[in-house]
Amino acid sequence: MASITFRNVTKRFGHTVAVDNVSFDVADNEFFCLFGPPLSGKSTILKLILGLEAPDSGEILIEGKPVNALSPAERNVAMVFQNLALFPHMTALQNVRFPLVERKIAEDKIKARVASVSEKLHIGHLLHKLPAHLSGGERQRVAIARALVRDPAAYLMDDPISALDARLREETRVELKRIQRELGHTLIYVTHDQEEAMSIADRMAIFEHGAIRQIGKPSEIYDRPASQYVARLLGAPAINLLGIERGDGVSAGSGTIQLAGLPVPDGAAGIGIRPEDLKAEPWTAGRAGVPARVYEVEPLGGYTVVTLSAGSEKLRVLMRGQPKVAVDTDVAVSCDPRKIHYFTSDGLAFSPAGTGA
Ligand SMILES: Nc1ncnc2c1ncn2[C@@H]1O[C@H](COP(=O)(O)OP(=O)(O)OP(=O)(O)O)[C@@H](O)[C@H]1O
Ligand SMILES: [Mg+2]
């Protein structure tokens, strides 16, 4: 498998800048996610790697070698276009063989390759069965085997499981992650589902308007988002973002949340607090915390999302279990100050030290 590098790559379609001066390095055997909203340039990145589109400027390298001048065939990168659904009239074996048969690979090579992939994916005992006789999870393993049966320099997947229902999507992404780890393939994976990106990627690149806004491990980006844009994209329910006001003291959220005594960096124009970092407790006289009123409660089994109104702001709090919180009662909201993210008026993050980034 191979590393893939972009150096200052730009791709325009007429006046649209689909990919805007993008640089990244995907390591050998890495599971790398491209994540961003629709039309942010994710698919174009894959087409540039495949050689289906040529960059206007910049350089693309596979295994350290420039490939700008190479045809798609010479690059030997495999794209998994279709979603991971099997052909129902073919056995698992015929399904897995299909990409090799289609490419007219020699029969002995097909046999060896199918045997190797089947062993690694533990599907040898399923190969004689039709998809209808496999469980959902078994079907997905076979489908992944078919996607991975070729032996290219890297695999590219463009939202491969978005068409599956939620339950199967969860199962499949676990299998994909496990299999990628076992086989050690370089995999570049596009998704617009933040949970999928967070759960599956070794590292991810977050796109906006064709440009990368942040690259890193999902947990690092979640804990230290480089901007409000990135902070908002990751996490459900979404991070609470409030404007900072400076008058008698420093406060946020139209004056509802006093920030006195906190290390608010000079020039901070907004704060962000993740719902799981807020605490809401029944209001009692003398209790520390910001007063708020319970607006709505969404019990979700293992946790509960409580929406509060504080002044003119809405705050979302994530609580464990199913706490007894009644609508229209008063609560005190508090938060560990170290969990507060500060942003400039341009929406960029201050560094954790509060020195300004
Ligand atoms: N062949 C093309 N001709 C003209 N414009 C294109 C072409 N391909 C992509 N674009 C434009 O480039 C931009 C990026 O598109 P791209 O398909 O890469 O986004 P994406 O992130 O994959 O979106 P989605 O999540 O909807 O699949 C968009 O503005 C799109 O309209
Ligand atoms: Mg796309």
Image (cartoon, helix red, strand yellow):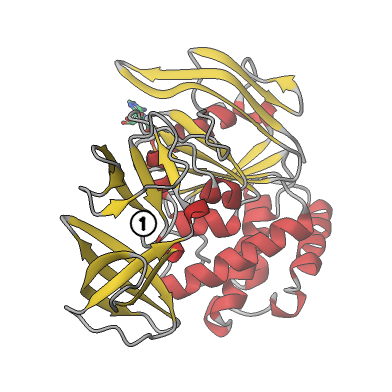
Percent x, y of residue 161:
48, 60
Say which residue appears at 15% left-offset and 55% top-offset. 312
Give residue 353's quadrant in the image. top right
Say which residue appears at 54% left-offset and 44% top-offset. 224
Percent x, y of residue 141:
64, 69
Q: Amino acid at mark 1?
A: Ala
Percent x, y of residue 159:
47, 51
Q: Is residue 280 above or below residue 357?
A: below
Say which residue appears at 76% left-offset and 24% top-offset. 64
Asked whether 6 or 353 is in front, the reply is 353
- Residue 76 seen by the camera: yes
Say which residue appears at 47% left-offset and 33% top-offset. 213
Q: Is residue 167 left or right of residue 327?
A: right
Q: Secondary structure at mark 1?
A: loop
Q: Is residue 347 left or right of residue 153?
A: left
**Crowd class of label 1 (few under 14; some 14 to 19; many from 20; radius 10 Å):** some
Asked whether 311 or 177 is in front, the reply is 311
Question: Which residue ends up furthest to the top in the rendered image?
Answer: 57
Give residue 38's quadrant in the image. top left
The residue where tag 1 is placed is 238
Quarter placement of the N terminus:
top right
Asked whether mark 1 and ligand 1 are closer than 8 Å, the reply comes as no
